[in-house]
Amino acid sequence: MAAIDEGLAQRVRESLFNLADFADISERKMFGSLIFMVNGHMTCGVGDEGLMLRVGAGKYENALTQPHAGEMDFTGRPMKGFLYITWQGIEDDEDLCSWLELSLSFILAQPPK
């Protein structure tokens, strides 16, 4: 099982609360990672290799063209609507927040679960 980078987890936690403090934010351990849920929807995840991010199908193709973004692949097939962001893409808090804002623009448009 992969280790969870606690430093990144805390940065994500603080950023999500700053960006969406009105939302229901929770955490679950899944897939060997710490998954952050917003209004009951999987939003992002932290493992030892960086950030998993859900952006939805509509923003997926464009987001893939951004530096440090790649397809998320747990099963041997890319998962549409989900990205993997490398460490270089989330080194700065500003960059991390930009990625989280992209995810939240999709997640907060969905009805709460």
Image: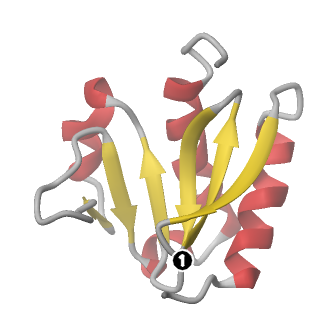
Q: Is residue 7 left or right of residue 96?
A: right
- Please identify the quadrant where the C terminus is shown: top right
Q: Is residue 109 above or below residue 73?
A: above
Residue at the image point whose x is 28% and y is 24% from the top: 58
Residue 90 location in percent, x, y? 54, 70
Residue 97 in the image: x percent, y percent? Answer: 65, 52
Residue at (27%, 60%) from the top-left corner?
72
Q: Quadrant of residue 66?
A: bottom left
Which amino acid type is marked by label 1?
A: Gly
Quarter of image, res 33? bottom right
Instruction: Specify whether 55 is left or right of 33.
Output: left
Report the residue at 47% width, 67% height from top: 31
Q: Is residue 40 above or below residue 4?
A: above
The vertical placement of 41 against 45, above or below, is above
Q: Which residue is mark 1?
A: 47
Q: Quick check: 95 left or right of 39?
A: left
Q: Quadrant of residue 23?
A: top right
Neighbour class for label 1 at 10 Å: few (<14), some, many (≥20)?
many
Instruction: Judge by depth and name the residue closer to the eye, 64 or 39.
Output: 39
Residue at the spot x=44%, y=43% of the render?
54
In the image, residue 107 lies at what x, y percent? 55, 27
Q: Residue furthest left?
A: 77
